[in-house]
Each structure stands twice: as C-alpha cells, then as structure tokens.
C-alpha cells in the first residue's frame, strides 16, 4: 500500500504541462456546418456535470495526456460524487461556501452501494491514508474525519475490463465531533447523562415523544430498526415521522445491533440526527426520567433551551 500511496501522491503533485501554441485561425465555416459541430462538441462535453453540491464524470473523457489528476471542488454541506469508468485519479476538495463555524467541521463519506473500480484515500501534503479499498466496504459503511485532516483522493485501480465500473460516494459536512464511523457520532449504546440529554433536546435533528412498537434487526448491516408510535413531535428536520391512521405519527430510527434494543412498555423521549437521509438514534430517556431532569435543571436555571414538558 505504501508504494501505491507514494505513486499516487507523486502523480497528484506532478505539474501540468503548459497549454500548446494556438493553431492558425481556421477559415469561417458555413452556418449549417458550424451549428452541427457545435451540437456534436456540446454532446461530447456533456459527459460530466458539476455544481456546488455534486460532481458526475467519466474516465472516458478524462484528458490523461494533459493531466492525470482531475480537480473537483464542492461547496455544499451534502452531495455526491459519481465517477463512471474510473481512470487516473480525482482530487476532491470539500469546503462549504459559508462563514467558518466556531467548531472545526466534520466530513462523513458513505460509498454508493455498487461502488467499485477505485480506492478512496484521505490525502494531506502528498501522504495518503486509505479509507475504502476497492470492493471492500460493507453496506452502509461510513467514515468520518475533520476537514482539517486533508482532502479526498480517489485513485482508479488497474482493470482489464472497465465496462460497468463506477465508483462514488455521498458526503455530509457537519459541526459535530468526528468519530471513526457513523455510529460513533449518533448511536452510543451507553445511557446518556442528564447533561447530554438536555443538550440533545436542543441540538438534535428530531425530538419526539412516543413508544416502541417493534424492533427489527439487519445482521448483515449490524443495525437494528426501531419502529415508533409517536404521540408528540417537538422537532423534526426531515419527514421521518408521518401521520398514522387513528391519530399520532409513525416512523423508524436506526441504531447499532450491538446495543440490543428491545420493545418495552411506556413512553420515551427519542432524539437523534439525520445521516445520509436516515434517522439515527441519539439519547432516549424514559419520559418520566426526562421530565424529572428537565424540571431540576429549570429550577436551577441550567436548561440550555426551553420546551413544553407536560
């Protein structure tokens, strides 16, 4: 791997050759022929697309004779990179086009389900750290790190047949602390302290009151899905919980299989964050425990935010 890293880093640092001398000006073309050439050239250049959030391209249009590392710049808090027929390498720079927050930003990336044909590295000053090896990522696997640790370097692996090869990933930027994977950010198995619960109520993407109807398990993903019947929604940034027949709402949130969540009686206060369109469990105290800790903190003037507590 070290040899591959040195080789990839060397290519990333190689200066690009200067532009060739301009050719002699051609004679004017007849208007119909000029329009036909414009359409054909426009179609050839349209094999990649880019905006502030996402990039999609093809190695078949990669100008390998002029540069081996394609530079990609993205300026959103979430998006995706899709690279068809990967050849050479991509250097992906992710920075939000906003004022820097007080806390360092965390970048999380999640390979697309059928991603293959390239290794994904974290690169800083020519040194590469492998994040995902070609073909060796499990379903839903995520890596998170601080943006100050470097940028992403995607290197195509040698292929005898590049047909149907495509590599890609989703990304998210947030101000939450970085962990080794998604679960370290959002689904600790240990119970939350009173302080953590009160802070979660103020900062989570969703805060709801409800009961566990069922728990289903996906051993291949090492995850459990908690199916909720919700009686009150305090906050939700995405439509995780939808109106249910007979009143209330229903929704599903995910957590680690190792946490051993089971259906239980009574109501809970569920909090958590959205990651790649999926609701992940944060703190979930029993409702009576939350009411006690909230009222105690309120009496001492220590609540970080206010909410209606029955």
Image (tube, rainbow, N blue to C red):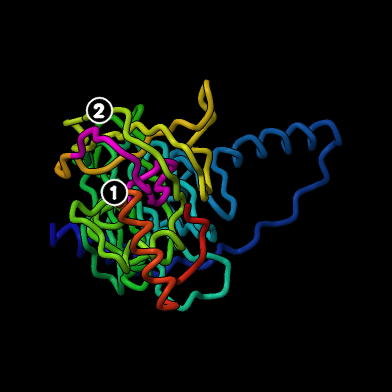
In the picture shown, does residue 56 fall above or below 93? above
**What is the span of residues highlighted in magenta in the rendered image?**
261-282
Which of the numbered marks, if any, corresponds to residue 283?
none
Residue 151, x across and y down, in percent: 36, 65
Relative to 70, 258 lies left or right: left
Relative to 181, 46 lies left or right: right
Residue 233, x across and y down, in percent: 51, 44
Q: Is residue 276 magenta?
A: yes
Q: Secondary structure at mark 1?
A: loop
List the single residue furthest toward the top: 245
Name the mark nearer the viewer: 1 or 2.
Answer: 2
Mark 2 nearby-residue class (10 Å; few <14, some 14–19, many ≥20): some
In the picture shown, does residue 161 fall above or below 189? above
Residue 240, x across and y down, in percent: 47, 38
Q: Quadrant of residue 230?
A: top left
Label 1 and label 2: CA atoms lie apart by 21 Å
Residue found 29% across the figure and 40% down from its top: 140
Which of the numbered marks, if any, corresponds to residue 216?
2
Labelled pair 1, 2 in contact (Cβ < 8 Å): no
Q: Quadrant of residue 176?
A: bottom left
Residue 146, x across and y down, in percent: 33, 68
Residue found 29% across the figure and 62% down from its top: 122
């Amino acid at each position: 791997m070290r040899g591959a890293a040195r080789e990839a880093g060397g290519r990333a640092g190689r200066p690009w050759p200067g532009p060739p001398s301009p050719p002699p000006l051609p004679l004017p073309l007849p208007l119909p022929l000029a329009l036909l050439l414009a359409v054909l050239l426009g179609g050839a250049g349209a094999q990649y697309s880019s905006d502030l959030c996402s990039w999609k391209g093809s190695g078949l249009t990669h100008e390998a004779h002029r540069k081996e590392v394609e530079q990609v710049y993205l300026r959103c808090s979430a998006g995706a990179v899709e690279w068809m027929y990967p050849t050479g390498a991509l250097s992906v720079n992710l920075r939000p086009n906003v004022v820097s927050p007080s806390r360092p930003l965390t970048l999380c990336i999640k390979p697309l389900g059928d991603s293959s044909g390239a290794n994904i590295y974290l690169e800083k000053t020519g040194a590469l750290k492998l994040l995902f090896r070609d073909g060796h990522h499990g379903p839903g696997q995520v890596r998170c790190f601080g943006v100050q640790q470097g940028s992403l370097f995607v290197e195509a692996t040698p292929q005898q047949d590049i047909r149907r090869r495509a590599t890609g990933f989703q990304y998210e930027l947030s101000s939450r602390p970085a962990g080794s994977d998604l679960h370290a950010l959002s689904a600790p198995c240990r119970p939350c302290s009173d302080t953590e619960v009160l802070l979660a109520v103020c900062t989570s993407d969703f805060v709801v009151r409800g009961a566990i109807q069922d728990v289903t398990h996906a051993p291949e993903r090492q995850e459990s899905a908690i199916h909720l019947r919700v009686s009150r929604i305090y906050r939700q940034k995405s439509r995780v919980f939808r109106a249910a027949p007979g009143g209330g709402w229903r929704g599903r949130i995910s957590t680690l299989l190792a946490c051993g969540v089971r259906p239980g009686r009574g109501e809970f206060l569920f909090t958590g964050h959205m990651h790649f369109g999926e609701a992940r469990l944060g703190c979930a105290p029993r409702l009576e425990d939350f009411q006690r800790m909230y009222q105690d903190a309120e009496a001492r003037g220590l609540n970080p935010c206010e909410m209606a507590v029955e």
